[in-house]
């Protein structure tokens, strides 16, 4: 095999392992969230920035009934994909937002659907 093929295989294995780590860390009781895609700079929820290929903050807490709004501040598209598929965004261009409302206490793991090394959690308190 040539070096490009080996690099590609190693990259795919790394992505699969990272995605498995995100899914295995999921501990929510059920899929108690609803998602609302939005455009612009604010969706009204507790803010999470997508910047420099990372979610900031990486972990955020909200009360049950609260929402989280992710804003893409990178020039590259990103997306939000929950481990349990309870909230998933489309690809977000620079400046676009995505909001998800959380109704059930638990911990919700998520990943960028485009860049699986980008991970985060939403902790929903009772």
Image (cartoon, rainbow, N blue to C red):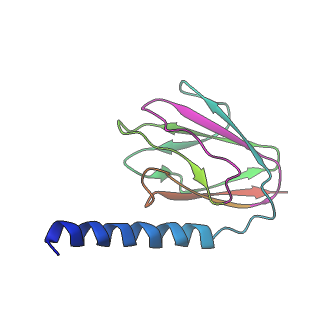
Task: Tell me the quadrant of the picture where the C terminus can be found.
Answer: bottom right
Residue 15, compared with residue 60, is above or below; it is: below
Lateral position of residue 93 relative to residue 120, left or right: left
Residue 61, compared with residue 22, is above or below; it is: above
Lateral position of residue 25 relative to residue 53, left or right: right
Residue extent of the magenta highlight = 84-106
Residue placed at 49% from the left, 52% from the top? Answer: 112
Q: Position of residue 114 (x, y in %)?
A: 44, 50
* Residue 108 or residue 44, whichever sits in front: 108
* Residue 83 or residue 13, whichever sits in front: 13
Residue 75, compared with residue 48, is above or below; it is: above
> Which of the 4 image quadrants contains residue 106?
bottom right
Q: Residue furthest left?
A: 2
Which secondary structure type mostly characterizes the magenta part of the structure? loop
Task: Tell me the quadrant of the picture where the N terminus can be found.
Answer: bottom left
Q: Is residue 103 magenta?
A: yes
Q: Position of residue 70 (x, y in %)?
A: 56, 40
Residue 120, compared with residue 69, is above or below; it is: below
> Which of the 4 image quadrants contains residue 110?
bottom right
Residue placed at 55% from the left, 38% from the top? Answer: 90
> Which of the 4 image quadrants contains residue 46?
top right
Q: Residue furthest right?
A: 126
Q: Is residue 125 magenta?
A: no
């Amino acid at each position: 095999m040539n070096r490009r093929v080996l690099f590609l295989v190693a990259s795919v294995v790394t992505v699969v392992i990272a995605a498995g780590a995100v899914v295995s860390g999921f501990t929510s009781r059920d899929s108690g969230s609803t998602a609302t895609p939005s455009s612009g700079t604010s969706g009204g929820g507790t803010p999470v920035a997508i910047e420099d290929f990372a979610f900031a903050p990486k972990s955020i807490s909200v009360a049950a009934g609260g929402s989280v709004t992710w804003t893409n501040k990178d020039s590259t598209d990103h997306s939000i994909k929950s481990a349990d598929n309870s909230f998933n965004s489309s690809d977000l261009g620079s400046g676009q937002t995505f909001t998800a409302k959380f109704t059930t206490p638990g911990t919700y793991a998520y990943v960028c659907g485009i860049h699986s090394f980008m991970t985060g959690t939403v902790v929903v308190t009772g």
